[in-house]
Image (cartoon, helix red, strand yellow):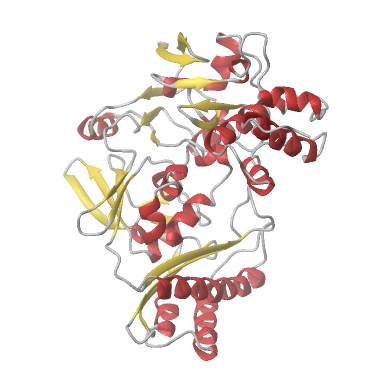
């Protein structure tokens, strides 16, 4: 079966790739484009480890065919930092030690970014519901939630205690 | 995933002819949150996947001049939840659509996918049936409109022909003193599948009695149920204790559930009555506030 040509914008840069029809966006990000920050957890849209932002919505890249990305804007975890400067979420995850094994972390960071892009001042409950599609089997979620709330405060220009 | 071909037609006519000409099994792709999971797990197979999202008008919500709404078949549920007009007129339909899956799933999942996946537990379907929603179906003979409750015929099976697909959902105009509500029971608040779902749609008369009602249930039969007896128990009454008891009894009587890991037959029947009572109370209060 012939490969499909796809042109998209990934982390602000134009990107082109060839894919098989049955390859997912996750497959292409990791195996063709070398963007291995995005992780494969369940492969069925339950764990959120493969979260990316597709045209301003956070989605599971395991549930998107690569061919569907034609013309789309995609942000992966690699697109969060600006050069060597980490995103506020990344810094607060470090500050709070909001990870152990780290496998869920890229997905949590991307989902949290999408959440704060839409709602810069979420309540704790909104953060918990907003990240319900991201499973972590190590830390429990409290440190993650506190890191996101502190990152939100920092991004609003408020002093973080 | 096993191999398949992918095509993204850019017009309704092209999509119909692609489906008509398809060799083997063709599957329609809208949000993909059910289809891709099932293809990967081997529960479904496809020779051709037809992505509907490049067809103009498939995504988006239009408020119709007469007061109704048209929702494109491939509109993500998240977009439905963000539409203020729809939230005001059809809060039950919106809450049902927005209960499906995580934020990630909400960004992709669609009403057409939820309906045509034909799960007995689909959350949006009882709410759409209660709302008297119709689907606009495209096929080789042109377009036809069908009541939502005519689409699912068995778990995993619809009444659509192989060269037909859902273009849009239409919700009717909303009079004053009318509202809907959808409730489902899951053991936790997020990321779960309905043990029972119940959608209720009420229109009140000027004196506060119920002028018309629709009661639809999910996950208590092989398909969603539109329960005329439950609606009849409401019409002509306010929500007094006797009316709610009659609603519960009629709702329970209609249930034909299975035992499975999510709930036993007895539990599902009991819960269906409870959800009907609670959804009726919510829909009634909303209707009273929409004068």
The C terminus of chain B: image quadrant: bottom left
Give the camera-side residue of B152 and A44.
A44
Identify the residue at horizontal 48%, vertical 25% (top origin). Answer: A65
Q: Classify B235 as above or below B73.
A: below
Which quarter of the picture shows residue B131? Answer: bottom left
Q: x%, y% of residue A159?
A: 72, 32
> How far across and down, in percent of the image, does residue A45 sit?
60, 35
Residue A4 visible from this viewpoint: yes
**Rendered residue at 43%/83% (across/down):** B234
Between B215 and A84, the residue placed more toward the observer is: A84
Give the x, y percent position of residue A50.
Answer: 62, 26
Q: Position of residue A59 (x, y in %)?
A: 54, 32
Q: Is residue A136 left or right of residue A25?
A: right
- For the point 31% across and 38% down, which residue is it? B58
Left or right of B26 on screen, residue B81: right
Nearest the eye: B170 or A121: A121
**Position of the N terminus of chain B by quadrant:** top right
Q: Nearer the viewer, residue A58 or B256?
A: A58
């Amino acid at each position: 079966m012939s490969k499909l040509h796809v042109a998209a914008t990934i982390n602000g840069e134009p990107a082109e790739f060839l894919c098989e029809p049955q390859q997912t966006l996750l497959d292409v990000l990791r195996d063709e484009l070398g963007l291995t920050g995005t992780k494969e957890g369940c492969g069925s849209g339950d764990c959120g480890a493969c979260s990316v932002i597709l045209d301003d919505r956070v989605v599971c890249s395991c549930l998107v065919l690569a061919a569907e990305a034609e013309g789309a804007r995609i942000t992966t975890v690699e697109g969060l930092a600006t050069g060597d400067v980490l995103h506020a979420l990344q810094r607060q995850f470090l500050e709070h030690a909001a990870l152990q094994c780290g496998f869920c972390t890229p997905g949590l960071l991307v989902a949290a970014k999408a959440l704060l892009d839409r709602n810069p001042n979420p309540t704790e409950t909104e953060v918990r519901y907003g990240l319900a599609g991201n499973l972590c089997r190590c830390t429990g979620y409290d440190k993650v939630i506190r890191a996101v709330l502190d990152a939100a405060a920092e991004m609003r220009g408020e002093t973080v205690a | 995933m096993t191999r398949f071909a992918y095509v993204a037609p850019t017009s309704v006519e092209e999509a119909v002819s692609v489906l008509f000409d398809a060799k083997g099994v063709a599957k329609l792709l809208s949000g993909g949150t059910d289809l891709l999971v099932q293809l990967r797990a081997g529960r479904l197979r496809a020779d051709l996947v037809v992505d509907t999202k490049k067809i103009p008008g498939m995504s988006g919500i239009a408020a119709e001049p007469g007061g109704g709404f048209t929702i494109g078949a491939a509109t993500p549920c998240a977009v439905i939840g963000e539409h203020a007009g729809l939230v005001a007129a059809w809060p039950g339909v919106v809450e049902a659509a927005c209960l499906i899956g995580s934020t990630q799933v909400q960004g992709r999942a669609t009403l057409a996918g939820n309906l045509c996946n034909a799960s007995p537990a689909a959350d949006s379907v009882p709410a759409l049936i209660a709302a008297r929603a119709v689907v606009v179906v495209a096929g080789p003979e042109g377009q036809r409109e069908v009541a939502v409750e005519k689409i699912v015929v068995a778990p995993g099976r619809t009444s659509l022909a192989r060269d037909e697909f859902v273009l849009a959902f239409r919700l009717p105009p909303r009079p004053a003193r009318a509202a809907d509500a959808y409730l489902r029971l899951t053991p936790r608040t997020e990321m779960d599948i309905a043990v029972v779902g119940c959608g209720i749609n009420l229109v009140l008369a000027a004196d506060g009695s119920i002028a018309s009602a629709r009661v639809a249930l999910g996950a208590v039969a092989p398909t969603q149920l539109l329960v005329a007896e439950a609606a009849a128990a409401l019409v002509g009454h306010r929500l007094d204790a006797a009316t709610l008891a009659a609603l519960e009894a009629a709702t329970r009587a209609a249930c034909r559930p299975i035992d499975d890991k999510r709930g036993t037959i007895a539990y599902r029947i009991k819960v269906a009555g409870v959800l009907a009572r609670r959804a009726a109370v919510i829909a009634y209060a909303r209707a009273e506030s929409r004068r």
